[in-house]
Image (cartoon, rainbow, N blue to C red):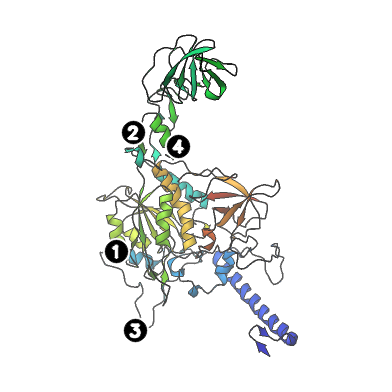
C-alpha cells in the first residue's frame, strides 16, 4: 500500500532495494559529471572526493532546511550548479557563471561585432534557422588543450580588484565646493584647516560664578554674563559675577566655580566656595581645541555628520569635495518583468531595484535604471551617449546568442581591462573603458563600464570585486581596509577559483572570539543569503575548515560592531 508519504513501512525490503538502485544511479550520474568536469577543466579531477568510495573530509551535519542563517549546511553551490538542470534556471542565459569557459573569443562574437561596426542592428539571434525550421549549431568552443584557444586565463580575484582600484585612481580627482547641507557623504578634496581658534575666546565650561583673586568674593545682585554677549569689563580681585555656560569669561578671571560648589550669603552679598578653587578651573581657554590654520581632518575623509559640525564650528560655510561619481545602470534581457509575478518564462528584474541603492551606498550619484532588453543597437546607443563616469550593465557578458556586451564593446573600440575573473559566483564579470565622445584615436578616455553577470548573487560579486574599488578611486575614498575573522563551519571551495560567501557576524560565547557564520542560499541566482548577511567571506580555492581565519568584505550598510570598525556611507 502506498500513501501520500511514500511506500508503506511494511514493505521495508522493497523500499531498501529501490533506494539502493536509486542511490547507485545517482552515484553513477555524479561520477559522470565529475568526469565531464575533469575533461573541461583539464585538471584530471574536479577537486571533490569520489562519493562512491573515496574519503570525504566534510563531517555529516544535520540542518534546518527552513533557516537561511543555519551555518551547518555545507552544500557547495558549485556541486548544485553542476547537477542542476540548467534549463530550469531562468538566469542561465544571462551569465555563464555555471560554465568554466564562456567562449568569448568565438567566431560568433566576432561576427556580431563586425555587424555592429557596419551599422547593422544585430538584434536578431546570431544563428538563423536552417531550411525546414532546424536551428544551425553554434560554433564549437575550443577546449582548454586546443591550440586554437589562445585566451589567457582570467585574473585572480585580488588582481582584478587591484586593476579596478588603479583604474579609479588614474587621474587627479576634480574639486567642487558644496554648501554644508549638501556635503554629507562626499569625500574632502583638500585637508580641512581651522579658520579660527577653537574656542575663539575664553569661555565658561559651566553655569556658576566667575571669580577673581582669593575669596570670599563680593557680588552685585542681579548682575550676570550670558552666552552670546560682547566682552565684559575686567573683574577686580575679590569680586564675582554670575556666568552661564558658553559665556565669555571676563579678563583677569581666576576660575569659574560651579553653582553647586558655591554658597551664596545673600544678606552680606558674599560668595563662598564649598571646595578648594584651582586657577583656570572650568574655563575653556582660547585655542584649547585648535589654533587657526591647524589641520582638522585630512583630504580623503568622508564627510560625516560630525565632520559637518566640526567644519561649521571652524568657520566653514562650504567644503571642497570630490564630486560623486555619476553612474548609469543599463538592465539587459527580454525575459525581465518590472512588476507582478513571474509567468510564461518571464522573471522579475531583481537587479534594477537593487543596484541603484547599493551604488548610492558606495557614494555614487545614480540615475534610474534603463531597461534595454536584448537589443544590441540600443545598447550601443546608450553607451555612446552616456556622460556618466561609470556605466553598469547587467547580463549579456557571456557568449550566448543574445549576449551583446562583448561585441558592442569591440565595435566601439573599448579597452577591456578585466575580462572575466577567477571568482565564484560572478566569473564572467568585466571591466572596460570606452572612448570619449569624439575620440578617434589613442587609449580610450571615456566612461568606465562594469559588466555584471545576470545572476543576482553573481552581480553582487561583480559589484564588490570591480565596481566598489573603482568608485572608491574615482571618488578619492580610501579603499576598504581588509580584515580577517574566524569562520565557524567548514566552507567548501571551488577547485581553482576564489569564492565569495555571504556571512553574518556573531559574538563569541563566554569570552570566546567573535566570528562569522556562513549563510545558506548562496548559489549564483540566489539573494536570500546575502539579504541576511553583513559581509562576504573571501574563501580561497579548496575551501576552509571551521576555525580558520578568512578575509571579510563588509557590505556598505554593515553597522559598526565590536569586531569591525564599520564605515559611514
Q: In the picture provided, is 530 more to the left or to the right than 294? A: right
Q: Which comes before the other along the chain, label 3 or label 2?
A: 3
Image location (x, y in percent) of residue 113: 33, 63
* Whole-number angstrom distance, CA of label 2 to CA of label 4: 15 Å
* Whole-number angstrom distance, CA of label 2 to CA of label 1: 44 Å
* Whole-number angstrom distance, CA of label 4 to CA of label 3: 71 Å
Circle 4: element type: helix
Image location (x, y in percent) of residue 312: 38, 32
Residue extending farthest to the top is 237
Q: In the picture provided, is 56 more to the left or to the right than 107? A: right
Q: Which mark is residue 534?
A: none
Residue extending farthest to the front is 267
Circle 3: element type: loop
Of labels 4 and 3, the one closer to you:
4
Tell me: residue 199, above or below residue 332: above
Toward the viewer: 67 or 390? 67
Of labels 1 and 4, the one closer to you:
4
Q: Which mark is residue 317?
A: 2
Give the number of callouts.
4
Q: Which comes before the other along the chain, label 2 or label 4?
A: 4
* Whole-number angstrom distance, CA of label 1 to CA of label 4: 45 Å
Circle 1: element type: helix
Image location (x, y in percent) of residue 127: 36, 74
Q: Which mark is residue 131?
A: 3
Quarter of the figure with residue 231: top left
- The residue that appears at 48% across and 71% down in the rendered structure is 89
Image location (x, y in percent) of residue 353: 40, 60
Marks 1,4: beta carbons within 8 A: no
Q: Which residue is mark 1?
A: 378
Q: Which mark is residue 306?
A: 4
**Residue 304 visible (yes or no):** no
Quarter of the figure with residue 125: bottom left
Amino acid at each position: 500500500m502506498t500513501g501520500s508519504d511514500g511506500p508503506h513501512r511494511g514493505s521495508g525490503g522493497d523500499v531498501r532495494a529501490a533506494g539502493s538502485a536509486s542511490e547507485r544511479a545517482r552515484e553513477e550520474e555524479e561520477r559522470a559529471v565529475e568526469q565531464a568536469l575533469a575533461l573541461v577543466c583539464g585538471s584530471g579531477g574536479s577537486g571533490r572526493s569520489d562519493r562512491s568510495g573515496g574519503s570525504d573530509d566534510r563531517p555529516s551535519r544535520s540542518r534546518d532546511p527552513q533557516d537561511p542563517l543555519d551555518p551547518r549546511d555545507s552544500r557547495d553551490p558549485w556541486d548544485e550548479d553542476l547537477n542542476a538542470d540548467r534549463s530550469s534556471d531562468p538566469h542561465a542565459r544571462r551569465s555563464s557563471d555555471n560554465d568554466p569557459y564562456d567562449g568569448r573569443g568565438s567566431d560568433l562574437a566576432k561576427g556580431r561585432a563586425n555587424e555592429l561596426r557596419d551599422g547593422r542592428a544585430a538584434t536578431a539571434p546570431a544563428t538563423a534557422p536552417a531550411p525546414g525550421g532546424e536551428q544551425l549549431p553554434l560554433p564549437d568552443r575550443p577546449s582548454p588543450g586546443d591550440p586554437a584557444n589562445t585566451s589567457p586565463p582570467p585574473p585572480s580575484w585580488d588582481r582584478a580588484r587591484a586593476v579596478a582600484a588603479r583604474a579609479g585612481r588614474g587621474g587627479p580627482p576634480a574639486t567642487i565646493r558644496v554648501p554644508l547641507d549638501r556635503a554629507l557623504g562626499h569625500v574632502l578634496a583638500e585637508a580641512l584647516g581651522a579658520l579660527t581658534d577653537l574656542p575663539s575666546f575664553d569661555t565658561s565650561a559651566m553655569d556658576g560664578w566667575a571669580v577673581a583673586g582669593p575669596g570670599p568674593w563680593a557680588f552685585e545682585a542681579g548682575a550676570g554674563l550670558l552666552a552670546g554677549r560682547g566682552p565684559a569689563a575686567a573683574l577686580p580681585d575679590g569680586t564675582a559675577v554670575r556666568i552661564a555656560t558658553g559665556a565669555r569669561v571676563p579678563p583677569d578671571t581666576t576660575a569659574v566655580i560651579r553653582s553647586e560648589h558655591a554658597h551664596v550669603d545673600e544678606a552680606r552679598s558674599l560668595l563662598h566656595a564649598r571646595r578648594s578653587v584651582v586657577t583656570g578651573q572650568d574655563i575653556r581657554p582660547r585655542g584649547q581645541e585648535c589654533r587657526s590654520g591647524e589641520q582638522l581632518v585630512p583630504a580623503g575623509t568622508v564627510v560625516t555628520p560630525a565632520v559637518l559640525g566640526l567644519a561649521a564650528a571652524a568657520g566653514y560655510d562650504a567644503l571642497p569635495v570630490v564630486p560623486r561619481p555619476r553612474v548609469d545602470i543599463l538592465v539587459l534581457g527580454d525575459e525581465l518583468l518590472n512588476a507582478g509575478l513571474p509567468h510564461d518564462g518571464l522573471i522579475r528584474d531583481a537587479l534594477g531595484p537593487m543596484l541603484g541603492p547599493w551604488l548610492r551606498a558606495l557614494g555614487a550619484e545614480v540615475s534610474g535604471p534603463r531597461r534595454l532588453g536584448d537589443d544590441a543597437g540600443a545598447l550601443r546607443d546608450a553607451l555612446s551617449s552616456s556622460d556618466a563616469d561609470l556605466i553598469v550593465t547587467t547580463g549579456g557578458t557571456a557568449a550566448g546568442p543574445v549576449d551583446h556586451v562583448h561585441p558592442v564593446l569591440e565595435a566601439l573600440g573599448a579597452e577591456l581591462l578585466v575580462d572575466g575573473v577567477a571568482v565564484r559566483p560572478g566569473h564572467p564579470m568585466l571591466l572596460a573603458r570606452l572612448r570619449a565622445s569624439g575620440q578617434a584615436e589613442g587609449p580610450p578616455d571615456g566612461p568606465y563600464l562594469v559588466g555584471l553577470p545576470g545572476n543576482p548573487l553573481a552581480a553582487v560579486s561583480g559589484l564588490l570585486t570591480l565596481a566598489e574599488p573603482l568608485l572608491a578611486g574615482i571618488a578619492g575614498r580610501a579603499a576598504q581596509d581588509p580584515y580577517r575573522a574566524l569562520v565557524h563551519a567548514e566552507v567548501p571551495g571551488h577547485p581553482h577559483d576564489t569564492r565569495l560567501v555571504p556571512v553574518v557576524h556573531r559574538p563569541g560565547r563566554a569570552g570566546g572570539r567573535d566570528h562569522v557564520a556562513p549563510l545558506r542560499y548562496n548559489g549564483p541566482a540566489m539573494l536570500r543569503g546575502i539579504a541576511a548577511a553583513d559581509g562576504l567571506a573571501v574563501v580561497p580555492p579548496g575551501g576552509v575548515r571551521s576555525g580558520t581565519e578568512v578575509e571579510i568584505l563588509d557590505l556598505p550598510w554593515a553597522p559598526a560592531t565590536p569586531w569591525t570598525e564599520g564605515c559611514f556611507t
